[in-house]
Image: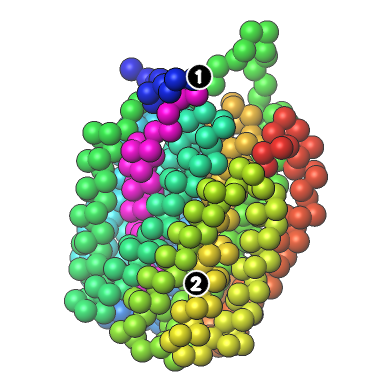
Amino acid sequence: MSTSPASASVLTSGSEPAFPVFRLLVLAGAIFVSVSSEFLPTALLPNIAADLGVSESKVGILVTVFAGTVALTSIPMTILTRRHSRKALLIITLSVFAISNVLSAIAPTYETLLATRVLGGLAHGLFWAVAGPYAALLVTPRQLARAIALTTGGGSLAFILGVPFAAALGFALGWRLAFVAMAVLVTAFLVLTIVALPSVDHRPRLTTGAIAVPLRQDRSLRAVLLVAVSVLLLATGHNAFYTYIAPWTIQIGGVSPDLVSVVLLAFGLAGLLGAVLAGVFGDRWPRLFVNVAGPAVAVMCVLLALFGHGFIAVVVLMMMWSTSFGGLPPMLHTRNLHGSSVPMRAISGSIITTAFNIAIGLGALVGGVVLDHLGLAWVPWVSAGIVIVGAAFTLATDRARIAAHPADAHRG
């Protein structure tokens, strides 16, 4: 039996349902293992490169391939599975994550590892297309920013626990064991998803007298596409630097390799703080939050390039960078959901997922090109430049985005 936002929670004394914290935390946990799986090569980059006898930029391509697979398959798979149970799709995609991590752990060659990343990418694109709108089906519109901040906080938690844990495990016991540990975590949250998450009715219902409109004619599509371009630019700039954070921290920042996991832990904690700030202030000042956070990311990248030398300086500046960026994914996901009509939501989730993953792959590719041709020291400068372009685009198209879906102008 499916549920609606109102019936998915226990009603309070008023008409507003209670906020379904536990269910959202389970969804956040699923997102946690998904993001941790995606960025595992980032944490283990030097280890994988040394063991398989390839360059660090070539290991960075693993991130590009994963994200590229997501970008190519997310929208088609979302369309093909639009009538299927949301919970069943979550279960299937998490199962594939677990299998792909096990296969990565036993991959004998770089090419085999590349193939396992393609498998993970296939699941990841569909997972995000389902997981993002799933949160919206558990809450009312007035609870949406809090719900999205909480669930996407699982992504921030991946950088706090998942990625640093993998880095520490990789340096201590080898990168293969890190993939095994991730497979175990995925399986744990797979079980929780089966037990705790309800089935939800994701099919849009027309109000009396309403007429169904083809998605390509939906006015809110323009708003979704504008948000997608903002995501593409801002996240590409961020990931151009983040993908190579481990070698940059060691070679340019002058941090000892055995302290890289500590740097990544601090980075993740700061990212969670950014997500918390989005949850606290996102409903009240959504446009201001996005328009301040974007430029702040660029400023932090520049400060790292200029003053990021030594453990203390690197940790402090990276925490400021991560806090600035940490609030952007939940706010952009929320902006997308508010800006899209109800019939558009399933496809809009896959569009934003595609944009994020093109950005992850493109960022890794751009950062790798800069690393090979200009050197690691130039990576944060290029990253900052791309982010500034993204922030400028977001600000310049703000009115056009609101005009495309004026009913939600006060929210986005």
Q: Could you tell me the amino acid type at mark 1?
A: Ser
Q: Is residue 256 above or below residue 390?
A: below
Is residue 269 shown above or below 131?
below
Please give the name of the residue rendered at 67% of the width and 14% of the height, measured from the top-left corner.
211
Residue 241 vertical position relative to residue 288 in the rendered view, above or below? below
x%, y% of residue 254?
44, 91
Residue 115 position, x and y percent, is 34, 60
Q: Secondary structure at mark 1?
A: loop
Quadrant where the N terminus lies?
Answer: top left
Q: Earlier in the sequence, mark 1 or mark 2?
A: 1
In screen coordinates, is 225 left or right of 109?
Answer: right
From which residue to which does the magenta span run? 16-43
Q: Say if residue 300 shows up in the picture.
A: yes
Question: For mark 1, what is the residue?
Answer: 15
How many neighbours does mark 2 have within 10 angstroms: few (below 14), some (14-19), or many (20 or more)?
Answer: many
As drawn, 321 above or below 225: below
Q: Is residue 128 left or right of residue 324?
A: left
Q: Amino acid at mark 2?
A: Met
